[in-house]
Amino acid sequence: MDQDKTTSDNSNGEGKSDQPQLVINRIYVKDVSFEVPMSADAFAREWQPMINQDTAINVHKLGGDQYQVELHITVSVREEARVLCLVEVQQVGIFMIAGVDGQQLAQVLNTHCPAILFPYARELIDNLVVRGTFPAVMLPPVNFDAIFQNSISKKSQPATSSAD
């Protein structure tokens, strides 16, 4: 049995090129920032915050079938117009993606890969907020498919003329 497994693992890759593959090579934190702009005044208030979450995705081809996907999340915790705390995280993954191309590759890079990275970023953000002695902030799930489809529809819309 082990010999059969070794034989299949050492194949020259023929026949596998048709099969879509997604391999996680590395997940890491590229950048992180935690700020409390109000200093001690932020802690003297009753905790009834409004939480704003901004999400962005950047994709870079590293070479061959290797891609770097960066998930940027900025969370601001506000009370009225004042920012109580601000967290910025860049969670990055290096992925090997083979057997897909064109629109399907774009969808994998902009939906599946960020969905893999999101739980890591969400945990880091919650951890930073709690270590800053604020109550926990559990971010809701993000629908990366909807973000991707919205992005595609915006790109396909013709530009309007401002000369009208």
Image (cartoon, rainbow, N blue to C red):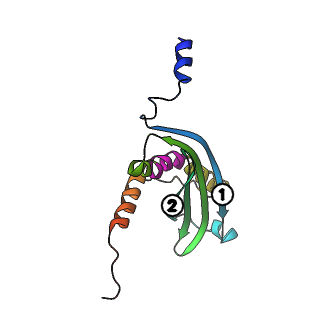
Q: Residue tagged by mark 2?
A: 56
Q: Which badge, 2 or 1, is on the more N-terminal residue? A: 1
**Residue 79 locus on image (x, y percent):** 54, 70
Residue 80 appears in the picture as rendered: yes
Q: Which mark is residue 31?
A: 1
Please tell me in which quadrant of the rendered image residue 147 appears: bottom left
Q: Badge 1, how many Cα within 10 Å: few under 14, some, many 20+?
A: few
Say if mark 2 contacts mark 1, CB within 8 Å: no
**Residue 95 locus on image (x, y percent):** 55, 44
How many angstroms separate mark 2 from mark 1 (CA)? 14 Å
**Residues in magenta, as a range:** 109-119
**Residue 160 locus on image (x, y percent):** 33, 79
1 shown above or below 120: above
Report the predominant secondary structure element of the magenta stretch. helix
Please tell me in which quadrant of the rendered image residue 45 appears: bottom right
What residue lies at 65% left-to-right and 58% top-to-bottom?
Answer: 32
Q: Badge 2, how many Cα within 10 Å: few under 14, some, many 20+?
A: few
Residue 143 appears in the picture as rendered: no
Q: Outermost residue, right direction?
A: 40
In the shown orientation, is residue 133 left or right of residue 152? right
Residue 116 magenta-highlighted: yes
In the shown orientation, is residue 11 left or right of residue 146? right
65 shown above or below 35: above
Q: Outermost residue, bottom direction?
A: 163
What residue lies at 46% left-to-right and 31% top-to-bottom?
Answer: 16
Q: Outermost residue, top direction?
A: 1
Q: Which mark is residue 65?
A: none
Viewport quadrant of the C terminus = bottom left
Q: Which element is circle 1 on?
A: strand
Q: Which element is circle 2 on?
A: strand
**Which amino acid, by three-letter code, is at mark 1?**
Asp
**Which amino acid, by three-letter code, is at mark 2?**
Ala
